[in-house]
Each structure stands twice: as C-alpha cells, then as structure tokens.
Image (spheres, rainbow, N blue to C red):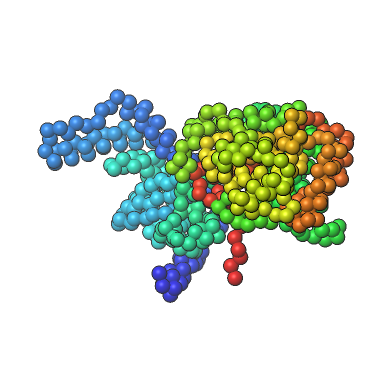
Amino acid sequence: MAEQDLNQLLKVRREKLANLQEAGKDPFQITKYDQTHHSIEAKGLYEEHEAKLLDGREAVNTEGMDEQAAKDAVNADYNERRAIMDASPIKVSVAGRMMFKRVMGKASFCNLRDLQGDIQVYVARDSIGEESYADFKKSDIGDIYGVKGYLFRTKTGEISIHADEIILLTKSLQILPEKFHGLTDTDQRYRQRYVDLVMNPEVKNTFVKRSQIIKEIRNFLDGRDFMEVETPTLVSNAGGAAARPFETHYNALDEDVKLRISLELYLKRLIVGGLERVYEIGRVYRNEGVDTRHNPEFTLMELYQAYTDYEGMMELTESMFRYLAEKVCGSTRITYGGTEIDLGKPFKRLTMNEAIKEYAGIDFDTVDGDDAARKLADEHHIEYEAHHRKGDIINLFFEEYCEKNLIQPTFIMDHPLDISPLTKKKPSDPSKVERFELFINTWEMCNAYSELNDPIDQRERFAQQDANAEAGDEEAQHTDEDFLNALEIGMPPTGGIGYGIDRLVMLLTDSAAIRDVLLFPTLKSQN
C-alpha cells in the first residue's frame, strides 16, 4: 500500500472518531463493559443446550428426493430446529476486536476475536435500530465492540450471536496488516507483539499455555509443601552460575551493583534459616549472546529441599515433567519439530564420562591429569583455554560429542569437580560431584546438585574461582563472605535444582526459538 493511500486511510479513521465524538458517542468515554462469556465458552454452552433440546432428533433424510425437494426439506428441518432453540434462547454478552465485516443491506455479519477465539455476529438493522446500524456500517476492522444477543446456528452450521445491541468500545486508529503472519520480517512481529497477538491466534495460544505451565508448576510444588519466595535482583556479588553479569550503579548508596545471574545463593541462605523447601520463579540476567535458545533476560526457577540429595531432585524432576505434559499437553507423549518425545518412560541415566565413552569412544576415567586431557583435546581439535583443567575439557568433549544425541529425556550425572564449585563431592570419587543435568531434544533443561554445605570446602572452591577470574575467566564466580558465614551457621544436607522456564515452554509448545515464548524478547534498538 502506497504511503499516500495509507495516510489517507488513517486520516479517515480519525475523522470517523471525530464525528462520533461530536455526536456524543465517544467510545473512549466508556469505562467498562459487562462481558458474560467468551467466544469458545459461548459456543460450548450452545452445543450443550442444543444436545439437550434436540436429543433424539434425527437429521433429515433427503434420499430419493429431487434437488428442489431436498433443499426444501433441509430448510424446513433447519427452521424447525431453529424454532425449538429460539424458544429457549441462550443470551450472552461478549466483547472483542472486529476482524471481519460483511455488510449486506439491512443485515450484516462480522467476526469478533477475544481471548479464546473468534465468534460470528449477525447484525440486523431491525434488531439493533437504524441509528446503531448506520454507525456499525461505518466501523473498521480492528475496532473493539461489545455485543449482547442470543446464540443460534446458521444454515451453514456456524454458531453465531444474533445481536440485540452492539456498542463501539474502542476505535482503532491504526490499520491491521492483512496477513501479519506471512511477513518475512519476524523482527517486526517481536517488536510489535501486540499486533502479533491480535493477528495470530496460535501465538496467543502459546502465551496462554506458558501461563498455564507456570501455574501448574506452582500447583505441583504446592502439593509437595514447597514455599514460594522472592530474593534480590540487584546484588553486590552475582554468584550461583558461570556467567558474566550486567553491572549498574546504585546512586543512593553510591555502590556498584550487578543484576543477578542466578537465584541460588540467597535461596540457600533460606535453607540455613530453616525454610526447608523453597523455590523462586524469577528473572535473571546474563550478559551473553542472543540465539534461538538464549536471551540475556530470561526466567529461571530454582528450588531447594533440605534433607535430600540429587537423587531426590531426579525423582522430583521426572515426576514434574510428566505432570506438566499431562496437564498442559494432555499426554506424556509430546512432539517437538516432528519428533516424538516420550516423557512417560523412566528417564535414561548416564554419567558424563559414560556418555562421552558411548558417543566419542573416550574413557576419561582412564585419563590421568590435566596434561593428558589437553593432549586428547588437541588430537580431537577441541578448543580450550589456558586455564582449563581436565574437568573443563571433559565438559567440552561432552558438549561436542554428546549433547546432539540426547533427544529422549536423559539425566547426565556426576560432573567433574572443576566445573561444579557449589556441589558436594562424590564420596566414592572426589574428582566428581553429585550433580546432574537433564537433556531433552539436545537441550539442557535443568541443572541439579547435592548442595555443598561444608564451609571449609566451599571457601577453597571460591578461592579457585577467584584464581580463574584472575587468569581471565570472565564467567568465574567470586568469594561470597556472607554466604560462607551462612554455611558456617550450618546448612543441612540439601538437594537443589534450576530450571530454564523458557526452554521448558519451548518444548511443551513446540516453539522453534526462545523469542517465540518471550512476550517481549531482547532486541537491538531501532535508530
């Protein structure tokens, strides 16, 4: 559409608004509307009512009739059914955005779109009055209407509303795209998510399902006596994960602070304080790149349970994922990108070294020392940094050879000590820790530990992280003296876990990119 034509259309819409305002019909003066039903709810109500009133009534049999006789029989049957239903009408009041309009003289049809979907409205001059009908004929696609009337089924079988009253609630001054989903500029969809939601019901459904997922997570954890808490977003020491934080300045205290990268260290303080089962669903911020699975601002859930270990966290995770699939998707068998994923079977379990042995043919349990590990990395063209030790290189091999093969749910356990500074060592092998990551569809879905509660050991691990930072590791953690003090007060044996909520939503909604499950993803500003 030429810019001149577009400007003219926009001008006409504003003129229509001005005319309404001059006539004392300013839609922006309306403060509320009594909405009794949504579209799908209304249709379901009618179908139930219809089934009761027409119970046992068979469809008309036109076999053996000529074309005109068959048509007359079908019309007569429709009129009889309509008369039965109209004698006991279901009245509704709905509100939504007009997405389609067809004016036909004294009667018209339009479609309204609300939270649940679309519903057709029959608008007749004799039903709503000549003045209201004249105003309606001047309406535009995108206008928001309230409609009161009764439900009926058209001859084509579509459940619709016969309007007794139709009120313009909001005048749309912009023009909706004709086929927004067809645009190749997906960046524009993310920038104008409000238009994306209006034009694409499947996008709206994804975010409705996201809300349901978070609601069901809370329901699941409530059933296990977990307590939801909130912890600081601005922190002096951003610990709990290997990531580079965003930094800012707190003017009132004249102190530099960071946006949290994790929820871990504050939640563990609450375990020390005697809150035995806690969780938080909150935003965290990591100063990293953007791709199909990463956004610098994302939603994380972490939970901590006293008196259990990583085995307990595995049971909780497997049970919760199965519960969510059943509640949100209706089955433990889900499909992502055309691949069926079975969350109903017991999840596979492999140690990290077992996975590397299976997919790369290398047994790191027989590799002695950092130098031998680096030599293997050189031979297999695995890039590493000067400060990387054997444990770091094991992790690099795992990322290179194993992750791409982990489609069905798989717990990867017993990570190297070098990459797990907050985790308890395995009593049987102090070079490893009691940790697991769950992989589904090649993605890491969560990360869990038997939490380290030895303050002396924790101080040594922090010291190693400080040394890594000095050596140039921008993602290394730093010593947190207050957290160490909390551990010295005493933290019971504890299992902890972190879940990336956005990836979980991607999995359960079959969404290709993290931006598709974030209402307002991070985008570079437009100049």
Where residue 132 sits, quadrant-wise, is: bottom left
Where residue 359 sits, quadrant-wise, is: top right
Number of marks in the rendered image = 0
Report if residue 182 is visible in the image.
Answer: yes
Q: Is residue 399 left or right of 127 when viewed as pictured?
A: right
Q: Is residue 271 left or right of 184 when viewed as pictured?
A: right
User: Residue 91 at x, y = what percent?
Assistant: 43, 39
User: Residue 289 at x, y = what percent?
Assistant: 63, 57
Q: Is residue 353 left or right of 65 when viewed as pictured?
A: right
Residue located at (51% from left, 61% from top): 188
In the image, 298 versus 466, the foreground residue is 466
Residue located at (46% from left, 66% from top): 13
Up-down relation of residue 168 to residue 37 (above or below):
below
User: Residue 326 at x, y = what percent?
Assistant: 52, 31
Where residue 493 sits, quadrant-wise, is: top right
Residue located at (28% from left, 42% from top): 155
Report if residue 216 is visible in the image.
Answer: no
Of the 4 image quadrants, the one containing the C terminus is: bottom right
Residue located at (53% from left, 41% from top): 405
User: Residue 365 at x, y = what percent?
Assistant: 67, 36
In the image, 375 versus 203, the foreground residue is 375
Up-down relation of residue 370 to residue 24 (above or below):
above
Q: Is residue 163 left or right of 77 when viewed as pictured?
A: right
View extreme (bottom): residue: 4
